[in-house]
Every structure is written in structure tokens, then in C-alpha cells.
């Protein structure tokens, strides 16, 4: 049986896992919630920055964000997940404006 199957992977190796939803650690700085408006013709809302698309918002859509990634490129927001329930997702900051 492999080390993976026996759960003998080191914490260091686990922290390097990337990929699908919930697998990559996203460093987010909480911010006082603000409202932003989509300025692009459409904006992909993703489960992780540059990850799988969860939803698409059209120009003018208003969204409430409560965090920003450590690199300052992505806003975090709470969405109703199309797969069921709610979850955090991310939108690119450069395609929005504060309102």
C-alpha cells in the first residue's frame, strides 16, 4: 500500500497540494465588507483564483466582497454555490469598481 493510502504524507507535502476546490490554500486578508460593480461585459466568479468557474456575472451586477487575496488581485465573496449550499468564491478585482 502506498504512503498516500496509509496517510503517511508529511505536512509539508500536503501543503504543496494544488488543484480543485478546497485543495489549494488561498491567503486572504479580511476587509470591511464593501459593494463592487462588475465593469467587464461578463466576469467569471471562481472557486479559487484562476480555478474552476462557479458563476458568471454580467456588467453592472453588484456584489458584496469581504476579503482580498494577499497579492491584491482577487476579491473574496460568499456565493450561493450552483452545486448546493454556500461557499466562498473569488472575482478578479481589475474588472470591478467600488460603489
Image: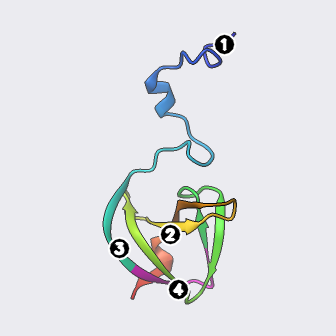
- Earlier along the polypeptide chain: callout 1 or callout 2? 1
Tag shown at residue 83: none
Residue extending furthest front? 85
Residue density around tag 1, few if under 14, some if 14–19, many if 20 or more, within 10 Å: few
Q: Which residues are magenta?
A: 35-43
Determine the CA span between mark 1 and mark 2.
39 Å
Report which residue position mark 3 lands on.
33
- Earlier along the polypeptide chain: callout 3 or callout 4? 3
- Earlier along the polypeptide chain: callout 1 or callout 3? 1
Cβ atoms at labels 1 and 2 below 8 Å apart: no
Report which residue position mark 4 lands on.
39
- What kind of secondary structure does the magenta stretch mostly adopt? strand
SS class of the residue under badge 4? Answer: loop
Determine the CA span between mark 2 and mark 3.
16 Å
Of residues 84 and 44, the one drawn nearer to the viewer in this rendering: 84
Report which residue position mark 1 lands on.
2
Relative to 26, say whether 66 is above or below: below
- Earlier along the polypeptide chain: callout 2 or callout 3? 3
- Earlier along the polypeptide chain: callout 4 or callout 2? 4
List x then y, in percent, for residue 21: 60, 49
- Earlier along the polypeptide chain: callout 4 or callout 1? 1
Q: Nearer the viewer, mark 4 or mark 1?
A: 1
Please count the marks in the image.
Answer: 4
Amino acid at each position: 500500500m502506498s504512503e498516500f493510502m496509509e496517510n503517511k504524507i508529511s505536512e509539508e507535502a500536503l501543503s504543496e497540494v494544488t488543484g480543485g476546490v478546497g485543495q489549494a490554500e488561498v491567503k486572504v486578508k479580511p476587509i470591511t465588507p464593501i459593494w463592487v460593480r462588475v465593469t467587464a461585459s461578463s466576469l467569471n466568479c471562481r472557486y479559487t483564483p484562476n480555478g474552476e468557474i462557479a458563476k458568471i456575472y454580467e456588467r453592472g451586477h453588484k456584489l458584496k466582497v469581504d476579503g482580498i487575496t494577499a497579492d491584491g488581485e482577487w476579491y473574496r465573496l460568499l456565493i450561493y454555490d450552483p452545486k448546493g449550499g454556500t461557499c466562498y468564491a473569488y472575482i478578479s478585482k481589475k474588472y470591478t469598481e467600488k460603489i
